[in-house]
Image: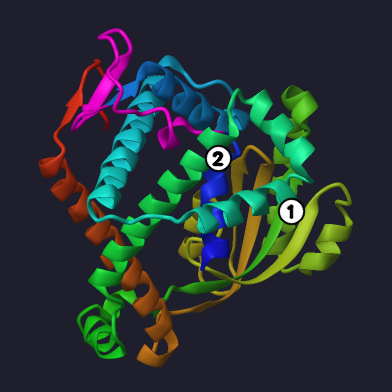
Amino acid sequence: MQNLRIGAVLAVLASFCPGAFAAAPAPAGPKDAVAQVGATVITRAALDERLQNNVMAVSYHGSPSPAQRAKYETTSLNELIEEELLFQESQQKKILLDKAEVDKIVEGEITRFGGKERFDGMLKKRGRTLEEFRKAVIQQTTVDRVKDGACKAAGKMTREEAQAHYKINREKYKKPPAYYVRHALAKVDPSALSTSTPEAEKRAQAILKDLRAGKDFMAVGKQYPKDAFNDLGWVHEGSIMPEIEAVVKSLAKDQVGGPVKTMYGFHVVQLLGRKEPEQLSFETVAEAIISDQSKARCQEAKAKLLEECKKRWPVKILIALSPQK
């Protein structure tokens, strides 16, 4: 179990998210404080660092808008508050790590980074010390143990409970409708949309006409080598683009529909068969029910614990935040 926890610790430590050591009981000036949890202050530096990490995690989508950044700021502060609440809970419950446990985790990380020299370089690059790293390990691990304790107390759903849940929620446990689909795509050229779009639409109309005339699907495909012709086989409802699925669902067996325009071009579809929703047996879904409902219980237990923690250690937000929608 400890090895799993090492991975969880590193998710925070590798980027040095500040919740592990930037919130401290030492007093901070009004300009430095963004929130207070009991007697502990969360600093602007801590929030800015967590915000930067959260923004970086989604930066491949492009720079966030001011509204998105404000939302990330609210999320980041909530994360820091929850971590501090759970850390204070761990201290009250006297959940402690002995030196040997911390040493083992640190030694494992030194090995993971390729030796002490590289590990020390990583610490220096992030402006951290070994003592801060050890403190982060202690805080993250004790917080995880508080969460684990809440989930353990909530208990795992039993098979009998899962069966009762299944009986009440049978409609949720059905295999969705399925459709046997052939699909043709008259492609557009993204670099020349103004000319390729009308050309692709013209080809799609010709494809549609040929298929409706009863010509063989693959034989028609050979006439359009630049386009895509595929036998998709059985596809379940919800697994293809909604605008294409809408056409598929409107067709009778062996009918052809389209063209449907998307960013990729013009789609023509042929329906070769359909299957109605199928009731799944309890045996088929028992493990999934137990897993999903046990996770739900765990989440509810952690949420309840946080509310109890807020009563013991009142939370004060000291800055204006954008409301969460």
Determine whether, in the image, residue 117 is placed left or right of residue 180. Answer: right
Q: Secondary structure at mark 1?
A: helix
Q: Is residue 23 left or right of residue 141?
A: left
**Residue at x 69%, y 41% (from the top left corner):** 265
Q: Position of residue 166 (x, y in %)?
A: 27, 83
Q: Position of residue 191 (x, y in %)?
A: 79, 26
Q: Which is more toward the observer, 276 or 221? A: 276
Q: Identify the element where label 2 is drawn.
A: helix
Q: Residues within 10 Å of mark 2 (few under 14, many from 20)?
A: many
- Please determine whether, in this image, residue 241 is positioned above or below residue 310: below
Near-viewer residue (29 or 268): 29
Q: Which image quarter holds the C terminus?
A: top left
Task: Locate residue 154, reporting x and y percent.
Answer: 24, 70
Which label is found at residue 207?
1
Residue drawn at x 18%, y 46% is 309
Residue 129 in which image quadrant:
top right
Residue 186 in magenta stretch: no
Label 1: few (<14), some or many (≥20) within 10 Å? many
- Name the amino acid type tagged 2: Leu
Give residue 25's position: percent from left, percent from top. 29, 28
- Residue 118 vertical position relative to residue 295 in the rendered view, above or below: above
Identify the image quadrant of residue 31.
top left
Name which residue lies at 24% across and 78% down: 169
Callout 1 amino acid:
Ile
The answer to which quarter of the image holds residue 66 is top left
Q: Which residue is mark 2?
A: 13
Upstream in sequence: badge 1 or badge 2: 2
Report how far apart the C-alphas of labels 1 and 2 lie in the structure: 56 Å
Residue beneath the point at 62% across and 26% down: 126
Q: Are marks 1 and 2 in contact (CB under 8 Å)?
A: no
Magenta-highlighted residues: 16-40
